[in-house]
Each structure stands twice: as C-alpha cells, then as structure tokens.
C-alpha cells in the first residue's frame, strides 16, 4: 500500500564531486540549501546579493557578477536612516554609504573570481511577480519597506522569463563550457498574493524553466524541490507556524533527495563526514574546562586535522580556529 506519491527525479542532473565549485542564487530556499553545502565543505558562493526572489533580479545579479560591475553612491538610496541598494538584500544596508558599497563590491568581486572556475550554478526562482520602481522603471530585488506607491507590481510571462534567460545562459555556457545549470522553484508559499495567484506564479516559473531545459538540453536541468514538498510531503506539518516556510525536517528531506540525485557516492561520504564534524563542533559543553571537555576538544582537533588531510581542497580554517581557541594550553 502506497501512502504517499514519490516524486521521480528527472534525468540529466549533474553528478557533483566534493571538490566541485558551486554558486547558488535565489530565494531563501537557496540560502538553506547553500548552508547545507557549506557545512558539508563544498566550495560554494551563496547569494552574493542576498536573497532574491524574482527571475529578473536573479538574472540581473548574474550579469553584474559577470561584468564585475562595481556600485557607486548614485546606485544607492537613503531610507529609514540606512543606505540601500534596490538590487540587494537589507543585510547589505548600513548607515554609512561607503560601508554599504564596500560590502556590495567585495561580494561581487568574490563571486566574479569564482565564475570562470564554476562547475554548477543553482538558481532558485521564488515568484514570477516583480516590483518596478516608478522613478527608474527597473525591476528591484528588494523594496526595503519603501512606500508601495513607489512601485508597480506585475507578473512576468513565460515568454519574458524564457527570453531573458536564453540570452543569459547562452553567454554563460559559452564562457564556461563545463558549467551545468540547475533550476529549482522554491516551495515557499507567497500567501500575500493569495493561493490562486501563488499557483499562477509558480506555474509561470515551472513553464519557463521547462522551456529552458529543452532549449539547453544536457547543460540545464531542473531539480523538483517544489514538487517534493508540495506533492510528496504534502502535509501542513512540513510547514512552519507561518504556513509559508518549510520546516527543518522538510528541508532535510529535500537535501537528502538532492544529494541522492546530484552527488557522487564519494561526495556524499565526504559531505556526511564534514557535516558531522560541523555538528560536533557546534556542541556546547555542560562543563567547560573540565577533563571531559578537554578530551572532547582534543578529539575534535584530531578530527579536523584528519579531514583536512583527506580533503585538502576544502576550507577548514574556521574549524582550526574554533579548536585552537577552545583547546586549553598545555603550559
């Protein structure tokens, strides 16, 4: 007896190794997946512009990363005592415009440096609705709680999204022949739009991605995160109290399906070992400084050194610092 419907994973997904280089852009679902990849010690850059929801903002961010576009004070706006970029998440906003620009341009530089070594680009689309700034006519990535009258809200069409990404992907894939692009559609629900409008938005994204996977067969794939949460899990217990965001359990399940589909057996083993180390170091001792705690830290230090030797391409600097700072001196 089958009590739930299993979502079949499509063919053509990439087979990633632990030393593969990745970049993730898109909604907060992309941030969550990126956190798991980072914990597993993959080399990845996650949302260099912060969380972005709509396809046009994501494609604009990618084009700016490719061009290594640096922002200037004229690109910012002052609102609520902070300097904001309409293209960036509020995490970049600061009272000093030069500090805001420093954060923005540093992240663009870092993402640009990775671009020509990239193996996989994962793009998570959240909504087909966009906000255009009335003063400029441009689609913004974040409204920064400015008055709604400053913006015009519209829903993109399948043709608009497909045309924009056909142009973008043609350039990216020519620039980096070994690159594989994976699209996902975020299972996060946009209830403010209303359930019907949310479904229309998700359907628009799904149709546009389907067109792109056909146009770039073998180079562009779709991972069904949306279907796994909505159809396979299919229960409100897999959503948080806000009924919008998937629970950690749901996110863990999607991660397991992603690892099953996209990671080689060797990469999965390495990812599990590195994630286990991160969880080990996140442990908070009941009695700091005790003999038991000293033994724990020494074991953790030995484990860090062992994994660093086995996976020399992974960055264990934070783990070294954590164990070095916490391990009592022998003097």
Image: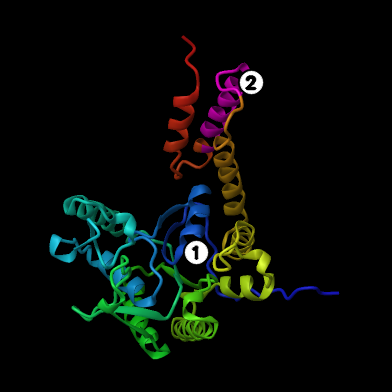
Q: Position of residue 196 (x, y in %)?
A: 54, 86
Query: Colour scheme used in the picture?
Result: rainbow
Which disc number belongs to residue 29? 1
Residue 195 in the magenta stretch? The answer is no
Tell me the residue at 60%/26% (across/down): 296
Tell me the residue at 56%/28% (across/down): 302
Tag 2 secondary structure = helix
Q: Position of residue 278 (x, y in %)?
A: 54, 41
Q: Is residue 180 above or below residue 80?
A: below
Q: Position of residue 260 (x, y in %)?
A: 63, 62
Mark 2 neighbour class, 10 Å CA radius: few under 14, some 14 to 19, many 20 or more: few
Q: Which residues are magenta?
A: 287-307
Residue 275 quadrant? top right
Residue closest to the far top:
331
Residue 202 versus residue 158: which sits nearer the camera?
202
Mark closer to the chain start, 2 or 1:
1
Residue 195 versus residue 24: which sits nearer the camera?
195
Spatial CA distance of label 2 from label 1 is: 38 Å
Tell me the residue at 56%/30% (across/down): 300
Mark 1 neighbour class, 10 Å CA radius: few under 14, some 14 to 19, many 20 or more: many
Residue 235 versus residue 317: which sits nearer the camera?
235
Q: Is residue 233 above or below residue 93?
A: below
Q: Label the magenta part by its dominant secondary structure.
A: helix
Q: Is residue 125 above or below residue 273?
A: below
Q: Is residue 98 visible?
A: yes
Q: Which residue is tagged 2?
A: 292
Is 36 left or right of 176, judged from the image as shown? right
Tag 1 secondary structure = helix
If the image is split into quadrants, where does the N terminus sit?
bottom right
Q: Position of residue 156 (x, y in %)?
A: 38, 86
Is 286 left or right of 181, judged from the image as shown? right
């Amino acid at each position: 007896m089958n009590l739930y419907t299993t979502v079949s994973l499509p063919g053509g997904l990439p087979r990633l190794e632990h030393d593969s280089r990745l970049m993730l852009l898109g909604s907060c679902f992309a941030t969550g997946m990126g956190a798991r990849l980072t914990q597993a010690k993959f080399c990845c850059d996650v949302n260099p512009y912060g969380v972005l929801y709509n396809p046009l903002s994501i494609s604009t961010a990618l084009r700016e990363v490719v061009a290594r576009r640096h922002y200037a004070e004229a690109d910012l706006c002052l609102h609520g005592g902070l300097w904001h970029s309409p293209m960036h998440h509020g995490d970049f906003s600061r009272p000093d415009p030069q500090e805001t620009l420093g954060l923005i341009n540093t992240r663009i530089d870092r993402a640009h440096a990775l671009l020509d070594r990239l193996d996989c680009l994962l793009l998570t689309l959240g909504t087909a609705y966009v906000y255009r700034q009335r003063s400029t006519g441009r689609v913004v990535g974040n409204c920064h709680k400015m008055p709604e009258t400053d913006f015009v809200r519209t829903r993109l069409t399948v043709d608009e999204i497909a045309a924009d990404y056909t142009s973008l992907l043609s350039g990216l894939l020519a620039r980096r022949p070994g690159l594989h692009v994976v699209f996902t559609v975020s299972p996060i629900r946009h209830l403010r739009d209303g359930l019907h409008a949310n479904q229309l938005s998700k359907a628009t994204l799904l149709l546009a991605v389907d067109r792109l996977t056909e146009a770039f067969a073998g180079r562009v794939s779709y991972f069904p995160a949306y279907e796994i949460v909505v159809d396979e899990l299919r229960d409100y217990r897999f959503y948080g109290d806000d009924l919008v965001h998937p629970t950690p359990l749901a996110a863990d399940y999607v991660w397991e399906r992603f690892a099953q589909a996209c990671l080689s057996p060797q990469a999965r083993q390495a990812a599990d070992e590195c994630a286990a180390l991160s969880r080990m170091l996140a442990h908070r001792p009941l009695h700091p400084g005790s003999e038991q705690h000293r033994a724990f830290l020494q074991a953790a230090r030995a484990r860090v050194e062992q994994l660093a030797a086995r996976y020399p391409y992974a960055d264990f600097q934070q783990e070294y610092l954590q164990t070095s700072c916490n391990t009592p001196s022998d003097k």
